[in-house]
Amino acid sequence: MKLRDALGRCPTELLIGGEWRPASDGRRIDVHDPATTEPLASVASAAENDAVDAVSAAARALPGWAATPARERSAVLRRAYELMTERAEYFATLITAENGKALADARAEVAYAAEFFRWYSEEAVRLAGTVQHAPAGGYRILVDRAPIGVAVLITPWNYPAAMATRKIGPALAAGCSVVLKPASDTPLTALATGALLAEAGAPAGVVNVLPADRSGAVVTAMLDQPAVRKLSFTGSTEVGRRLLHGAADRVLSTSMELGGNAPFLVLADADLDDAVRGAMLAKMRNGGEACTAANRFYVHESVAEEFASRLAEAMGALRMGPGLDEGTEVGPLVNAAARAKVDELVRDAVDRGARVRTGGRIPDRAGHYYPPTVLDRVAPDSALLSEEIFGPVAPVVGFRDESEAVRLANATEYGLVSYLYTRDLRRGLALAGELESGMVGLNRGLVSDPAAPFGGVKQSGLGREGGHEGVLEYTETKYIATGW
Ligand code: NAP
């Protein structure tokens, strides 16, 4: 689809209570194209009183939506899945335009995002409680599940569609109404998703979308409203920590999907072709701008040289260019700050002695490009082994034995996902148990699946999204001691 047509169809005002309206103080956000740095669109930027209005609209819509038969809520989500799938090119074009990722990555994101609507349309009609005999006899323990209430959803720029549907899908399935605050770099996809849900039949006020560049003030204003009972956040650990402090004042239920620092372990017996294919997925999906991106490659010293050179060959061969060009495999990074951080991490590693196998330099062209980069002989104190790189950079470090590999893998405050390649499945399962992460890719470079519980341990988060667990995050457990 042509960019002009996609932009022409996309709403640019706030969605509050079923109406599109400008910010009360007229403020706007300029959305930029990372491939050119040129402005793409201007979007309304909510003020604090708009945020209060959005929560009120969600609170008014809540009782009706919570009382709507699950079968009907399910049908709305199913229709949203169908509409998003039919309009995949529209959504992919918007995602690429505002985020920069290659169209192939954006199309994969749309398919993934739509699947959350389908999965939760199926979960909506399967929310069951339990009944049991009280052990002492005399009554029954009846456990029911009720929608938790109005949910505030905050999403990052790296998956502007999927991070929104991964929250909206289960919230609507459970009977909650929501206010979505997307990242300021990528509000267009969120606004298009809001319009799509209205068309799919979500009643006015059930889904409100509120772009806001005064994020702190606007989110605080929402969390201060007594109607809000849930905060679901995806973003950096730093902002997540701050929001947890804010949520504590009102004892809000929180779900936190935070940063990662994924280790990718290649044991001596691994199938190297398979490991390099997995590494390309784990590192280069979304150009490295993924919380699940492999951040550190620990490879047995007997195969480290071979692995680094094969990975460098594969990464060096990727075509970098504007995401909207069909042949592009790696687009630009989202903004200038993201690229500056990646470059700083690479410079630091090189200053400490790392060898550049491919890439490693900002190209001389417009746009926020950084080339696919492989470094080996990386010193242990290099910052990119402890910080999230969030770009197309793969540092390779050799290890001597498996206990050293697990120790290195676990030496981080993060614990979202780990990857492990070995031909010995029994050994692999035993090591997977030792890795401190909420998810493990065992001989797989991709773990994300709407049917699976996605989430981290340690400072990578609280709670799970996806699977059956995802819908439970939007419910409150109610126990009724019942004389029978
Ligand atoms: P971020 O800076 O933490 O921002 C995330 C969201 O929070 C944005 O909507 C942002 O709005 C908002 N925000 C920023 N400061 C805020 C504040 N003081 N109060 C309330 N909201 C605030 O993260 P990002 O740079 O967009 O995304 C990258 C991070 O997300 C990485 O760390 C990545 O690992 C993580 N992530 C995690 C997962 C997961 O599932 N675990 C998935 C994807 C990404 P503005 O844009 O307006 O600042």
Image (spheres, rainbow, N blue to C red):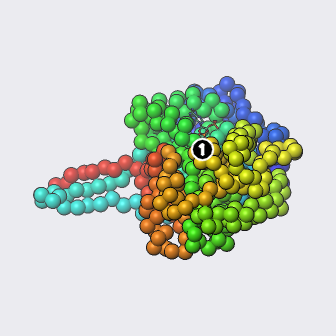
Label 1 sits on a secondary structure element that is loop
Q: In which quadrant is the C terminus drawn?
A: bottom left
Which quarter of the picture shows residue 63?
top left
Residue at 50% x, 37% y is 241
With 385 as the anchor, is 310 left or right in this view?
right
Please state the horizontal and vertical placement of residue 422, each as a whole percent of the image: 55, 70
Residue pushed farthest right?
365
> Residue placed at 65% from the left, 27% from the top?
24
Image point (25%, 51%), residue name? 480
Q: Which of the pair 298/315 is nearer the observer? A: 298
- Left or right: 90, with 424 as reference point: right
Question: Which residue is under mark 1?
Answer: 381
Residue pictured at 42% horizontal, 54% vertical? 472
How many callouts does the rendering have?
A: 1
Farthest top residue in view: 25
- Image quadrant, ligand 1: top right
Provide residue 294's location: percent of width, then percent of height.
61, 56
Give the percent coordinates (x, y) of residue 183. 64, 40
Residue 245 in sight here = yes
Residue type at tag 1: Asp
Residue 115 seen in render = no
Q: Nearest the camera: 129 or 256?
A: 256
Residues 438 and 265: in front is 265
Task: Say whether mark 1 is within 8 Å of ligand 1.
Answer: no
The quarter of the rendered structure image containing the N terminus is: bottom right
x, y percentage for residue 355? 73, 52
Mark 1, other Cα within 10 Å: few <14 / some 14–19 / many ≥20: few
